[in-house]
Amino acid sequence: METVDEIWNWATELNPDFEEEELTEYVTVYKNVFKYPDRVLAFQKLLTKWESSMSARPGISTLALPCWTGKDIIDNLLDYDNEWQISEGDIDVEYIYFYANNTMKDKSIESLNKDLYTGNCLLPHNDGQKDEVDSFIFITNLNNRPVRTGFWSMNGEVVGDMDLTEELNEYYDDIDLSNLEEKTNNGILDNVLNVEYNFNEALFYNAKAFHQPWIDNFYTRDNPRIMLRLSFDLQP
C-alpha cells in the first residue's frame, strides 16, 4: 500500500543553511527553512481540507498531519529548552489558509463587525493558555509575497497567563468596528510589534503571546494566505 510518508520526507527536507534571528524573548525568525520550499507548497495539494466552523480560527485548514512530521522540524531546526519534555500527542501540523472577509460556515456576514479576533483577525488571540504548560508555534510563509504577524500587549504584558487572557476576552465584549481605533493602542491593548517575513521564512513564537495574522484584501477564498503551521507543548 502506498503512503505519502516518502513524499513528505522528499518535500520537506530542511535547509542546513537556515538562518535564525531572535527578535524578542517571545519570537524568533527562521530564514531559508526548507531546501525545496516549492515542494512543501505542492504537498498540500494532496491533503483534504476543512472549512472553519464552530471555531475561532478563520479560513480553511487541512486535516492534521501525523505528529512525527513535526518532530523532525522540532529536533533538527528549533532552539528550545531541552530540559522540558515534548509530548508527541501534543504536536499538531497542518496547512492553514486565511483570506479576507471570511465569516466561517456558522457565522453571518454581520460577525465581521463584532468578532474581530477572527474573520479578518483585527484583534489578537493566544493559544496554549494552561499556566503549567509551555506552548509554541512555528509557522512558515508559503506565499510568494511577504506576510505579517502582529504581536500585542494587554496591560503591558505580551505573554498572557489564563487570568490575563480571560481579562482580554472580557475587554473584547465592548469592541466592534465602530470603536476599534479607540479601544486599541491606548495603553490597555497595544500593537507592540509587527514582523514581516518572506517565502520560506518562519516565525517561532510563544503560543501564549498575544498575536494576530495581518490579512489584507489581496487574499481571497480562491487565493488564500497559505501557511504551514506546527504547534507543540512542552512539559517539565
Image: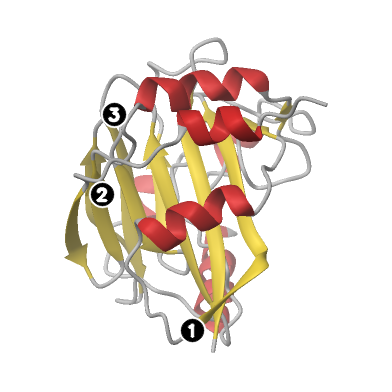
Give the labeled residue for mark 3.
199
Q: Earlier in the sequence, mark 2 or mark 3?
A: 2
Q: Residue type at mark 1: give it.
A: Trp
The crowding category of the residue bearing disc 3, from other C-alpha atoms within 10 Å (few below 14, some 14 to 19, many at least 20), is some
Q: Secondary structure at mark 1?
A: loop
Give the labeled residue for mark 1.
84
Q: Secondary structure at mark 2?
A: strand
Give the labeled residue for mark 2.
30
Q: Of 9 and 66, which appears nearest the observer? A: 9
Q: Of 4 and 186, which appears nearest the observer? A: 4
The N terminus lies in quadrant: top right
Q: Residue at x 51, y 68 (%)?
A: 168
Q: Is residue 145 left or right of residue 223?
A: left
Q: Earlier in the sequence, mark 3 or mark 1?
A: 1
Q: Residue type at mark 3: give it.
A: Phe
Is residue 135 shown above or below 193?
below
Q: Of 206 and 40, which appears nearest the observer? A: 40
Q: Position of residue 43 (x, y in %)?
A: 55, 23
Question: Is the image coloured rainbow, by chain, by secondary structure, or in one colour?
Answer: secondary structure
Q: Secondary structure at mark 3?
A: loop
Q: Residue furthest right?
A: 1
Q: Residue furthest front?
A: 1
Q: Position of residue 19 (x, y in %)?
A: 17, 49
| C-alpha span from label 2 to label 3 | 11 Å
The crowding category of the residue bearing disc 1, from other C-alpha atoms within 10 Å (few below 14, some 14 to 19, many at least 20), is few
Q: Position of residue 199 (x, y in %)?
A: 29, 28
